[in-house]
Image (cartoon, coloured by chain):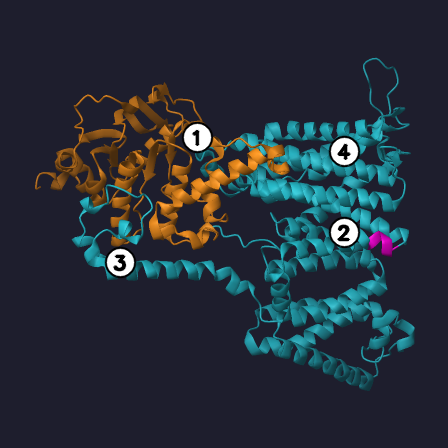
Chain colours: A cyan, B orange
Amino acid sequence: MSGDDSSDGASVDGAPVDGAPITGSDAISGDPGSGPETLAVSALNIGTDEWVAQHETRTSTGHGVGARVNALWMSGPAAVRWGLPLLVFVLFPVLVSDGYLLRIGVNLGLFALLALGLNVVIGYAGLLDLGFVAFYGCGAYAYALLSSDKLGVHLPTWLSVPAAVLFTALIGLLVSLPSRRLSGDYLAIVTLFFGQIFTELVLAGDAVSLPGASDPVDITGGANGISGVSGWSVFGFSFNTNRSYYYLVLFFVVVLVLGLGRISRSRMGRAWRAIGEDPLAAASMTIRVNRLKLLAFVVGAGIAGLSGTIFSAVQVGVYASSFDLPMLILLYAAVILGGSGSLPGTLIGAAIMSVLPEVLRQPTYSELLFFVGLVAGVLWILKPKIGALVLAATVAVGFAINIVLLAVGVPYLSAAEWTQGVIGELLGRWLFVPQDRLLWGNVAFVLLIIAVAAFSRMHGRAKMWFLPLLLWLSVFVWMVRLSTEASLTRQLVIGATLVVLMIARPQGIFGKQRVEVL
Amino acid sequence: MSSPQASSPTRLLELSQLNMSFGGLRSLQDLDLWVDEGEVVSVIGPNGAGKTTLFNVITGIYRPTSGDVRFDGSSLVGANPTDVASRGIARTFQTVRLFLNMSVRDNVMAATFGQTRAGLWRSALGTPGARREEREVRARAEELLSFFGTRLMGYRWDQPAYSLSYANRRRLEIARAMATGAKMLLLDEPAAGMNPSETHEITELVGRLRDERGYTIMVIEHDMHVVEGVSDRVIALDHGVKIADGLFDEVAAHPEVVEAYLGRGTAGTK
C-alpha cells in the first residue's frame, strides 16, 4: 500500500500534544507531507468497510416481488408498522364470533408471550435453555393449585397470579444457580434434564408420601392433571369467555413488547447481548456476567410462568402433556424462524408456529395454503418474469403428464371424486389423480425427495428447466398423498418451512445476519 | 522518563514474586515488575514467553499460583475480570474480541455497564433517571469514538462491528476499553496485522492516550518500531522470566534479549 512511504518520513514526535481531543484526519495521519497518500489510504479503508457493511443489504435483497414488498413495508414509519397489526388484532374478536377462531387467537397470544420470554434467554443472553417449557408448566400448575378444589384453595387472582409467577421465577433461579457456570451444550443438557424432571414429578405427583400423612397424598393429579381451575377475576371482572382472555393476553403481549423493547435498547439489553456474543470480553468490560445470566433465566421463567397461569385458567385445567417436548420444539422453531433476538421476528414466528398447525388441520385450508405458498414463493424468490414463465411451464407440464398417463391407461379418479374446496375445483381438470393414491403417492414422494436432492446439485439454467417438473411433482405428492394425512403433513410442512428458511435466510425472518468470524 | 532504578512517587501496578503454573508448565516465574502512573511500558519477548499470560493474570482471567498483584494500593489476587475492570484496568485482546453483531456505538456503550445503575425495572419503564443515564452514556461513547478521528467517525457508528476493517476493530476495542472508565489500559498486540501506515497511527495513538487522556498503559508488541516509539520503559520476558527491564536502547542491546530473539549462536556476533 502507499502507506509505506508515509511511515518512513513520519516521526513519532509528530503526534499532536496539545489541544483538541477531537481532531480530524490530520491528528491521526500525522506527517503533513504525506497528506494525499494517507488520504488515499483512508479513503480505501472506508471503501472496504462500506463494502463489507453493505454485504447484508446486497445479499439479502432478492430480485423478486418479495424484496419490493419488504422494502415498502420497511420504509413505513414505526407507528404504522406496529400500529397496523395491533389494530388488526384488537378488532379481530369484534369481527370474528367463532369460538374456535377466538381460541386460536388466545393460543397465539400465549405462544407469543412464551416466545417473548424465550427470546430473552436465547435471543438476548444466548443461553440455550431447553427446559423452558417446564417454567410454563410451573406457572400453570402453581396457579391451578392455588385456584381449584385440588387443595381446596381459591386465592383471589391478584394474589394467586403474582404468587405463581414469583414461584416460577424462583424455580428459574434455582435451576440457573447450578448451571450459571455452564454454557452451550452443557447448559442445554442440564436444562433438558430439568424439563424432563418436571414432567416426571408432575406425573408422579398423585401419590406423594408426606411425613405426617399415613397415605400418599395426591397433589398434581398425575396423568389426569388438575381440572376445575377457576378463571381470572380482576377488579370484580371475571374472565370466562375466550374473548375476554384474548384481550387479556393481547394486553400482556403489548406490555411485554413495550417493556422488552425498552430493555433491549437499555444497558441491560446491551449487556445481555454482549454476554451472548462473548462472555469473556463482556466480563472484561465490567459486565457482571453470572448475575445477568441468572437474571435472563429468571425473567424468561417469570414470563413463562405468567403465560402458564393464563393457560391453566383458559383451559380450566392443566395436564402434564401440555408441557412436553413437542411444545418446546414449536417454541424454539418460532424464535428461530422469526429471527432470534428480534421482537417483531419473535411475534411473527410465534404467529406462524401457532396458527400453521391449526390451519393444516383442515384439508381445504392446507391446500389453499400450499398453493398460495408455492406461487408466492416462486414469485418472491425469482424475478417476476421468470417466475411467471416457470408457473406457466408447470401448468404445461401438468397437462403433458395427463396426456401421457391417459395414453398409457392408468386408472384415474374423476375430478368430482377427489376435489374439495376452491383449489380442488380449479385443479380438477389439471392434476391427474390415480385411483391407487397410496401407491402412486408413495412412489411420487420418493421421487420428489430424489428430485429435490438433484435440484440442489444443479446450477443456473438447468435449475430453471427442472423447476416446473419439481413443482408439479410436489403438487402431485401433496394432493394425492399428503392432504389426506393431516397430522403427518403438519410436521412435514413445519420441517420443510424451517429447512427452506435456513437455506434462504439463516438469520430468521427479522433477524440480523450474525457473523461469527470474518 | 523514569529509569527502572528511580524510585517513583506513584506505583500504579506492582507485581511481586508472581508465579503462574499450568500443571508442570511454569508460564511466569518469580516475576517482579511495576508500572508507574502515567507510564507507557512495553512487554516484549518471543512467542510463548508468557506475555499474554501476564495480562490474563493481571486481569483476573487466571488466578496466580503464588505472588501478589497490587493495583492502586490493593491486591487484585482473587478478583474476577469484572472486578478488575471495575477497579480500573481495562484490556484489549490479542485476537480481537468485539461484540461483532452489535453496533459500533453499542460496543462502546456496553462497556459502561459498571458505571451505570439503571436496573431491569427502571429500564423497562424508561424512568427519567434511566433515560438521562442512557443519554450520558451515549454521549460519552460518541465522544470516545471521536477520539479516533475520521477512522471511527459518525456515519459508521450504527453499523455492526463486523463490518469494520481489521485495523478499525482494533481501534474500536481500544475505545471500548476506554469506556470502562479504567485508568490503566493493557493493550495486547495493538499493531498486529496492520499495514505500515496503520502501525504508525497506532504508535501515535498510544502516545495520545497517555498525553491527552492520562492513561497508564502496558502494551504487548512484537513490532520493534512501535515498541521504540511508544515506550517509556521496556520489559523483556523469556520462558516466563523477566530478562531485562529498562529503556528501549538498553533492553534492545541486552545480550539475553538478543539471545532470546535470535538464538544462542548469533548472540556473540552482534
Q: What's the distance in space between the residues labelled 2 and 1, CA to CA?
A: 43 Å
Tell if the residue under mark 4 belongs to the same chain as the one under mark 3: yes
Chain under disc 1: B
Task: Determine if residue A326 is in view.
Answer: no
B26, above or below A452, in the image: above
Q: Which residue is mark 2?
A: A354
The amino acid pointed to by label 1 is: Pro
Tell if the residue under mark 1 belongs to the same chain as the one under mark 4: no
- Front one among A493 and A31: A31
The secondary element bearing badge 4 is classed as helix
Nearest-to-viewer mark from 2 and 3: 3
The amino acid pointed to by label 2 is: Ser
Report whether A512 appears left or right of B167.
Answer: right
The secondary element bearing badge 1 is classed as helix
Q: Position of residue B28 (x, y in %)?
A: 30, 28
Report whether A146 appears left or right of B245.
Answer: right
Report whether A341 appears left or right of A41.
Answer: right
Q: Which residue is mark 4?
A: A139
The tag earlier along the polypeptide, 4 or 2, is 4
The tag earlier along the polypeptide, 4 or 3, is 3
Residue A43: give its label: none
Which image quadrant: the C terminus of chain A?
bottom left
Q: Which residue is mark 1?
A: B81
Residue A38: give its label: 3
Chain under disc 4: A
Predominant secondary structure, magenta span: helix
Q: Is residue A93 magenta?
A: yes
The amino acid pointed to by label 3 is: Thr
Residue range corresponding to the magenta coloring: A92-96
Q: What's the distance in space between the residues labelled 4 and 2, CA to CA?
A: 20 Å
